[in-house]
Amino acid sequence: MADDARERPGDWGDERPDGVAGRLDDRAVSEVIGSILVFGLLVSLLAIVQTQAVPNANAEIEVKHSQSVQGDIADLQSAVSRTGTFGGTESVTVETGMTYPSRLVLFNPPAVQGTLASGGAGNVSLENFSAERADTDSYIGTNPNFTTHAVSYRVDYNRYTDQPETRYEYGVVANQYDDATRIESGGGPVSGRFITLTMLRGGLQESQVRPASVTTYPVSAPAQRVTVESPDDRPANLTIATGLSDEVWVSKILRDQLDTNATAGTNVTDCGSLNSGSTNAVADPVEDDGRFVVDCSYRTVANGSNELTIRFEQNQSYRLGMSKVAFSAAAEPTDATYVTDVSPSADELVVEVRDRFNNPVERRVDLTVERADGSTEEITTDPRGRAQIQDAVDPQLDRPANVSLRGSSPSDCIANVTCAVVEPPGLPAASNIRVTNVSADDSENTVTFTFENQGSRDTNMSEVQLGFATQRNERTLTVTVGDTLESCGEITDPTTCSLDQEDVTTSFVTDGPDAISNFTVDGTTYSSGIGAVENRDPVAFTDGSGNLATLPRSSTADVTYALDDSFTLAGKDSVDLSVTVYYEDGSVATYSRTLFQEDGGSG
């Protein structure tokens, strides 16, 4: 009995009441199951986040990148335009690719790689234009052809599937979707009487995730405008290779350039919907609406690309500016094409060598001069492409000199594109015009230039351009004892803190007038349909009978420009103003002035 009552090792738990040992075992199992359930819940939550939230967040990131890169292409368009217009290099950054933000324990798709590239070569041609100057006409009359390239950006996102292909050509940035095309920036090659063609050299290829730095280099720039004309017996045409449809060109890009007669009573959607389908279409020159595109045609050529032909109103003059821009500094310079006379006076005979874009060849070029007495001389231009000719004109025989590129015949200048006849003209009109006074009336929003024509001939103002009009408001900070300035601490005595004038005066630059609405010359008002908008192409202003403004010879004239928005000259306010005048002989002058209260502002 004593042995039976002895505790047996290992059996003590068997005799505990209420099954305590069983409950302990059950609790341990519950904790394991709970952990498994929590883990499973976390895995499920992560799976939901991975399959739904992450893709949606990535799609939003992709849309924002698409919008950002479209802005970068617009910046590239502006850089190309500035290089072609003013020369010099420009650099922009294009976010060609993108990466996704890192996410802990979550997976992202691979980084996106976009491609920015120039496409295949396309043709640009001028047909049936003539030039105002005979030497320029000898080249323009050959119906010259050019080569250019468009630039496109393509990208394939992982989630965003409605991304466009962004395309840049002829100053236009367009987003091409599957079912529509949207113009993002730029105005196209035609603006009123101005035809602007910036050809692009190929060779651009950027395909990467990291941002790409793109630099524009002038091949032929800055663009030098020349006056060309469309004859009255045949249409003048501009033909361009394009990747955009004729519906986009007609209904969006050229819509504001289509002559009123060509669009009257029609729903303009493409070239075929214009009124003037005739090859001899001529708009009414009396009713000048500032629009000179009268017709167009669109076709697919043999290599599968598209060509658009723009037809201009006949018997009109236009200002043609061409340039070429590259994306590499290794681009070959343009060749010398023709010689033109740019003599400023009878005492200084100067010729200029130009390339096929009508721009000076800025390097040394060898020329041959055939003098009036039959003798010849070899000369070389300066780095600007110009050469001065001494004693080129025989004052007794009054015979001109012939100047040609070395290797061509100077004796046949009439038929020779590479040759110019140098005949000393009078001084250009712009050199005879002086500004003797500038005044303003901020209550009437007008600025008056007093021009003095010191020449012996009346001078017509063919076009006017507003460069800029900027309002400046100057305010002075008054400091008294007790004031606290970050740079001085607390001011206990005005002599303990010395402030320079620039420290206490602030100039606020605000938007000024945006356009010249009209102007008057000695009481006669001259206007245009659109006004001279700030930093845009110059505009022709005429009176009610279509006449240009005239500055009489050997006299002064007040030219009062009416601005479309108010400005103030009270106190220390001022306005920076720059106006460029294009004279009928082709010369140009820019007049800039900062106006203060003493120039006519209100007190």
Image (spheres, helix red, strand yellow):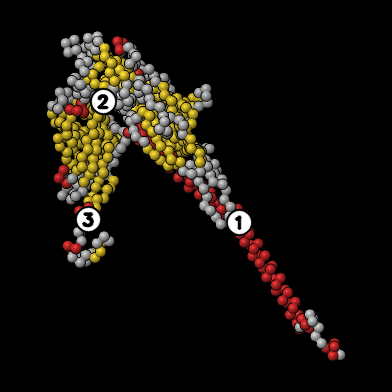
* Residue type at numbered disc 1: Ile
Task: Label 1, secondary structure: give it.
Answer: helix
In the shown orientation, is residue 458 left or right of residue 184?
Answer: left
Contact flag, marks 2 and 1 (Cβ < 8 Å): no
Of discs 1 and 3, which sits in the foreground?
3
Task: Say whether disc 3 or disc 2 marks the residue closer to the N-terminus.
Answer: 3
In the shown orientation, is residue 60 left or right of residue 254?
Answer: right
**Image coords of residue 491 (percent x, y):** 21, 65
**Image coords of residue 81 (percent x, y):** 37, 34
Look at the image and tell me in which quarter the N terminus lies: bottom right
* Residue type at numbered disc 3: Val
**Image coords of residue 586 (percent x, y):** 26, 25
Q: Nearer the viewer, residue 182 or 322?
A: 322
Label at residue 504: 3
Mark-to-mark CA distance, 2 and 1: 71 Å
Q: How would you rate the neighbour count of disc 3 (Cα within 10 Å): few for under 14, some for 14-19, many for 20 or more?
A: few
